[in-house]
Structure formats: C-alpha cells, structure tokens
Amino acid sequence: MFRLLVSLLCGSTTLQAAPGLAEIGRSVFTDKNLSNPPGQSCMTCHNPNHAFADPRRVSPGANPSFSGNRNAPSLMYAALIPAFAYEDVLLPNGTEIFAWEGGLFYDGRAKDLFEQVGKPFFESHEMNLKNKAELAQKIRKSTYKEKFPRSALKDNEQLTYLVFRSLVEFLKSPSFRPFDSPFDRYQAGDEDALSLSQKRGLDIFKSSGGCADCHLLEPQNWSKPLLSDFGYDNLGGPASGRKDPGLFTVTGNPEDFGKFRAPGLRNIELTAPYLHNGSIKTLREVLEFYNKRDLEPERWGVTDYPETVNHDDLGDLGLTDEEISNLLDFLRAFTDDSLTKKKTTLPTPPKGTPSTESIKLNFPDHTHRLDPNFEHE
C-alpha cells in the first residue's frame, strides 16, 4: 500500500503484516498521556456516549488556563465529509453559483481529515504540545509503541505521520459509519421504521421547514445521504464567548464573517449543545430558533455578525408547535441503533457494513499523499 511502510517493516511485502493502522489509531485516540500536561485524549472531548461529540458548551484544554470557543462536533461520519473546495452549486430555484463547501473544523481550515487530526495536538487550548518532536517522544514512551515499525520510532517526522494516518484510518473504520438508523431502514423500504409523527416531520423537513435544502436527503458523495450539503452560512446564532469570524478566517472575504459549515444531522439527537459555539442547549430550541429567530430577537440575544445573517431561509418559517414536535420526532430517526445499544468505547457496526479497504477510494482523504513521508508503489 505504501512503500514507506513496506520498507519500514524490514522486508515485509504488504501493509497487512503490520498491526492495522486503525488499531494504532484507537490506541492514540484514547491515550491521555499525549497532552501537556497529561490527562487529555482525543476521547476527552469526543465522548462515545454523545456520538463522539462534547456535551459541554466548549471543551477545556489540557492546560486549565485555556479553553476553546467552539463546541467539539461529532466524529461519527466525519471521515466522509468532502474536501474543502470552491464548488459549482445549483440552488433549489435553479440558480447556479459558486460557494465554499466541505472541509474539517467549522471554518473549513483543514482541507480533509488528515489535516484535521494533527492540529489539536499543538493547539494551546487543546492538547498543548509544542511540536512534533514532543509528540513523537510521548509516543515512544507509550504502552503501544511496539505497534509502530522500529525504523519509524527513530524519526520524528515519520512517526508523527503514522500517528496522524492511524487516526484517520480509525475514524474511517465501519464503527463510525454504520448507517443503521430508523431513517436508513425507512429509506430501504421499511414503512414501519418511522412513526406517523416522524413521517409528518419528514414532509415538513422537505417542504415548509426548508431543512432538506441544506441537509440533503439524497446521496451526494456517498452511497447514502450524509444529511448535509456541507456549505457555509451565518445562521445568526446567539453570541457566546469570544467573537468568532468563522469562514472569513480562511477566505479573508468580509461576506464570510460568521459563516460556519452545515453539519450532517446523523445522531443529532445525541450531540447537544448545538451550533458552533454550543449556545443553544436543546434540539427543540434549535428548531424554535430556526422558526422564530426574527420574530423573537429578545429571546436569542445578539449575534456576532448581523450583517451577514441569512434572512432568506430561516428566522420566520411559520411552523406551528405541533409541526415543530413532528419535526423533532423525525430528527430522532437519524440516531443510529449502534449508538443506542450498550455504550462502549467504540460501537459495533451492523453486519454488512463495508470495510475501509473495500471502499478506500471513496474517502476524501488526499493531503496525506502530499506529505514528504508518503510514497506509493
């Protein structure tokens, strides 16, 4: 698979002779000794019981003097988010425009998952390491260091490259993409998978709620819907904490102030609080915000960048309380059965979920090939 890994395995001819990268990634993901000071792992802020999101508004850093200003999002299906790109988009009214889509983090500053997984190690408000050399040294002291090729343990760049690649492979594994929600069963033809209330919610989702305009119900870059167009918008969410410029940080375009990437809605029931800054506590409140934001401004308070807020698609939807309840019931149908069973570090995917190897080209994971430590056969 990779000449680098093959050569590091001292004559072995296939990657399969090494411990699986996903297995290494799981060890890295749960290791609390990789922060400074020790005590914070990736899983500290991505809780398995909350679809690998953080139930706190924002996540404190390993150094308690620092914390972020965003709510850590779910890692379920994160490996399927398309790469950051300026795309040709066809709007529901037939208008063709160009817009930013995809990318990791709420502002798209990481093109894909490989760029994303390495950044938290070195952020002062997250794991707070100084550089790759410090991360490599901690890996050399880990209980799972023998899972890495011996030659890589001697080279900081190669070792940290494998750390990042292993996290990517872990997050690409079937457990993070089970597609086994009631909605998926309904899409497959099981009419009884949704209740009557949920079916009414589905109709609202596609019509008067306008939800399906951004949270697409049709497959796009994957064989099943990811429930987002992964575009960017300023919803006018309540201000909370430091002012966050969002997409503007990446593009430098004043029109992008306060815009954040639309999340996928899978397992949305489990990932409270909501919006990029965790400013809305419950899913019902999110729907009420979308429905009456412009009619009840005093309820929601000020927003960071009012000049770029979207007033065309939300804020005065005219939905009744009953319709809100139906819509809420439907959103609960996006919760995977795998996550509602006995809680474990990693949920068990349903039988028949394709392996990563069988569909590896479907993943938008490109930048690792630009890394100087990557060599293909």
Image (cartoon, grey):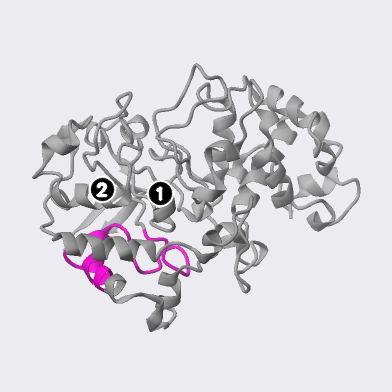
Can you see residue 82? Answer: yes
Which quarter of the rendering shows the C terminus?
Answer: bottom right
Can you see residue 216? Answer: no
Q: Which residue ends up furthest to the top in the rendered image?
A: 65
Hey, what amino acid is under mark 1?
Gly
Location of residue 126 with respect to 226 vertically, above or below = above
Location of residue 161 with respect to 240 vertically, above or below = below
Task: Residue at 74%, 35% (x, y): give it.
Answer: 159
Q: Secondary structure at mark 1?
A: loop
- Let me know if residue 222 is in the magenta part: yes
Answer few, some or many: residues within 10 Å of disc 1's Cα (few below 14, many 20 plus, some between 14 and 19).
many
Which residues fall within the magenta stretch?
200-227
| Residue 58, quarter of the rendered image | top left
Query: Nearer the observer, disc 1 or disc 2?
Result: 2
Observer-nearest residue: 217 or 301? 301
Q: Which residue is mark 1?
A: 102
Is 20 on the left or on the right of 169, as rendered? right
Is 221 on the left or on the right of 233, as rendered? right
| Residue 358, quarter of the rendered image | bottom right
Hey, what amino acid is under mark 2?
Glu
Q: Which residue is mark 2?
A: 285
Task: Residue at 47%, 47% (x, y): give it.
Answer: 74
Task: Residue at 70%, 22% (x, y): give it.
Answer: 134
Secondary structure character of the magenta stretch overall:
loop
Location of residue 165 with respect to 277 vertically, above or below = below
Observer-nearest residue: 26 or 282? 282
Observer-nearest residue: 282 or 231? 282
Location of residue 101 with respect to 213 vertically, above or below = above
